[in-house]
Image (cartoon, helix red, strand yellow):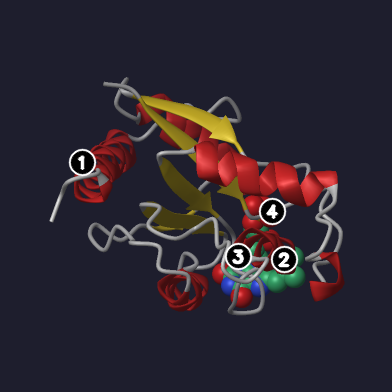
Amino acid sequence: MTHRIGYLVGSLSSTSINRTLSTALIRLAPDTLEFTEIPIGDLPLYSPDFDGDYPAAGRALKDAIEASDGILIVSPEYNRSIPGALKNAIDWGSRPWGQNSFARKPTGIIGASIGQIGTAVMQASMRSVLSFLDAPQLNSPEAYIHFDADVFGDDGEVRDESTAGFLRHYMEEYCAFVERVLAVNAPGHI
Ligand code: FNR
């Protein structure tokens, strides 16, 4: 059975290493996952003033999240936290109050950094946000990617077999996790 995965890239950079990582992950993922990017770059800054009448970009984001069986967040770490553009998108998806689009969506968090800690602090912060939003998260394996331009081709090719094997394993575990959460969410499951 095919599962629809909506993925968010937390960087607006035209040369984003996290976009490259997302391309690699899609190439290595099980065939049963079908990926659609959920764009975040055209969203205005969220304000509760929009809650009565969401603009098209905010509505489109919520619709895309709700149409997804699972969410995959691929993001850099900015100043030891979540990039502003991505946090803004999550705020849009979480509102209006009572209409949180992330609730019960199985979610994976992964990121690449040029630094050695590979987005670990951003991911810890993101887990706190997603827990508040009632989004179940893949806990293991964790994936903190130190980006090496010699390993990752722009087209998503991963030239080092150990890295490719790890990312393939991550996506297999993510797929199994999505299936488990979907089974629990299914009507009739106690
Ligand atoms: C960074 N970078 C960075 N790296 C890191 O490991 N921890 C951090 O806290 C930060 N902070 C940070 C803040 C800002 C504003 C920028 C622009 C960059 C470096 C970061 O890892 C590097 O720029 C990556 O290339 C960002 O990922 P994308 O945008 O290329 O996907």
With respect to residue 26, does 46 lie above or below?
Answer: below
Mark toward the viewer: 4 or 1: 1
Q: Identify the element where label 2 is drawn.
A: helix
Q: Quadrant of the C terminus?
A: bottom left
Left or right, residue 7 beside residue 109: right
Instruction: Measure how far apart labels 3 and 2 are at the Cα level.
Output: 10 Å
Residue 138: x and y in percent read 29, 57
**Mark toward the viewer: 3 or 2:** 3
Q: Which mark is residue 88?
A: 2
Task: Identify residue for label 1.
Answer: 176
Label 3 or label 4, whichever comes before in sequence order: 4
Relative to 52, 22 lies left or right: left
Instruction: Describe the element under mark 4 as helix, strand or loop.
Output: loop
Is residue 42 in view from this perspective? yes
Q: Is residue 16 visible?
A: no
> Disc 4 marks which residue?
11
**Secondary structure type for disc 1:** helix
Q: Amino acid at mark 4?
A: Ser
Residue receiving disc 3: 94
Disc 1 packing (10 Å; few <14; some 14–19; many ≥20): some
Residue at x 72% of width, y 41% of height? 60
Disc with the residue nearer the chain's start (3 vs 2): 2
Q: Earlier in the sequence, mark 2 or mark 1?
A: 2
Q: Give the camera-side residue of 158 and 98.
A: 98
Which sits earlier in the primary sequence, circle 4 or circle 1?
4
Specify the amino acid type for callout 2. Answer: Asn
Classed neighbour count for the residue bearing mark 3: other residues with Cα under 10 Å, few (<14), some (14–19), many (≥20): some
